[in-house]
Every structure is written in structure tokens, then in C-alpha cells.
Amino acid sequence: MNITFQNKNVVITGGNAGIGLATATAFAKSGANVAICARREDKLNSAVASLKQFGTTVYGGLCDVGDSKQLLAFADEAEKALGTLDVWVSNAAIGPSAKIIDTPEEMWDQYFNVNVKSIYVGAKIAKAKMKNGGVLINASSFASIMPSVNTGVYAATKAAVSSLTKTLASELAPYNIRVVAYIPGVIHTDINHAAIEKNREQMLSVIPLQKFGTPEDIANGILFLASDFASYITGTCLEVTGGKFATQNPSAAWND
């Protein structure tokens, strides 16, 4: 399967590190022009520099996706830099570490603005700027399927993302825009490194493949969803999890 995005224009929010940067890199390697945004200028500049080595057009903009005005302005700048948009990946997200009942109201608002409202704004951008049709791809989470204590607010936002993805798939279908989401498993990124090192055996015990994912694993899934090979896939969430919790006791198969 040869996936190419030659002459396609792709936007990835939160594209400065981790899954976002791996996705931007994969698209650039496949011939796409790429725009990314982030909140930290130093990491944004570093990511843009790394993406330019592949010879396609690259644009980077500072943006807090939880601020609708900033996100809309970034979309305008990305369109100006690249041209008509073909793929929009709403990757940026944040997650609290507190019980729901202990979460301050202003923190609640912040997480819903970044994780949920940005999906709504991304859909409006897709409808306005994907003049030839396209693909809107949203970051959901395994927490949308199985929430955890201390990350309940995050789980609620991601359950909302999965639900919005289904409805938006119908609403945007008349505009030839597919809408899908991806659900990462336990991915070995800088953010997850400490937790993985502390709880390695327990975390592996629920993954049938007995290994953690990489940002590139998720990027490959996103490229597939964005490609013509997935032209009849919309309104669904792709799990890229190594089979996490496919059964209650996946490690038992390794003990036989």
C-alpha cells in the first residue's frame, strides 16, 4: 500500500511534539504541505525546522486551540500559506489529574474549550476551507471507552469527541468531507514516559501485543484514515491500541 499526499495541504494542531509531530512528519514524507500550531514558540520553531527537510511547504503558527479566535486566525494563515485545505487533524488536547469533584470550574472550562470546542471549531473550518472535500480527523482517547479515576474530566471530553465525530460525519457528508477519529493506546511519548517506567508490567498486562505503541504507530493510522484507501470510512473511531483490553486477561495467552 503506497500512501501519497502529493500536492495535498494538511493541518495538524499540536504538531510540535509527540503524536502531532510524528503525524506532521509522516505527511511531509508522503509529499504533503503541512501546517502545525502550538503554544510554545521554541518547540514550534524546532518542529518547523525538522519538517522543512522533506522539501514541502511548511507553516507554523502560535495558537491556543481553546481560544476560537486564535484557532480561526491560524486556519486563515494556514490556508494563505498552503492553499485550499484537504486534511485537518485536531490533535491538540490537555488532560487534568484530579478527581471530577475536586476540579475547579475554571479548569473544567479550560479542558472543554481545548478538547471539545476546538473540535467544533475545526469542523466549521473544514466546512469553510475544504473547497474540494477532505477529511477531518479528531483525537479521541481510550479514556472515552474506559475512564479512570483522577482523569474523569479528560475522559468526558474525549467521550464528547467520539460522539461529535459520528454526528459531524453525517453533517459534513454533503460537502464531501469524511470525519473520523483515532484512539491511541499506551503510547511511549515524553509525557507518558514516567508513568510507563513506574507501571510498566501492569500496563503491559492488558495489551495483547505486549508492547507499547510509538507516535509513529498512531501517525500511520492517521495517514491511512486520511488517504483514499479509507474513502468509505467515516463516522467511526480507529483504535490503535495493540488490542488493549480486547479481553479481560490478554496476558494469559503468553503464559500458556
Image: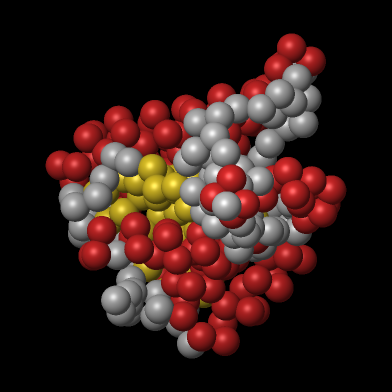
In the image, is residue 233 above or below residue 147? below
Residue at figure coordinates x 31%, y 34% from the top left? 166
Colour mode of the rendering: secondary structure
In the image, is residue 87 above or below residue 22? above
Q: Residue furthest top?
A: 101
**Which residue occupies the foreground of this view, 252 or 115?**
252
Q: How many marks?
A: 0
Left or right of 242, for residue 82: left
Q: Quadrant of the image for the N terminus?
A: bottom left
> Which picture quadrant has residue 5?
bottom left
> Which picture quadrant has residue 46?
bottom right
Q: Residue 63, can we see it?
A: no
Q: Residue furthest front?
A: 256
Where's residue 210, x and y in %? 61, 56
Where's residue 33, x and y in %? 42, 74
Where's residue 240, x and y in %? 48, 52
Residue at figure coordinates x 66%, y 40% from the top left? 94
Residue at figure coordinates x 23%, y 65% from the top left? 228
Q: Residue furthest left?
A: 174
Left or right of 5, for residue 95: right
Q: Residue 160, can we see it?
A: yes
Where's residue 2, x and y in %? 30, 79
In the image, is residue 39 above or below residue 146? below
Residue at figure coordinates x 29%, y 40% from the top left? 235
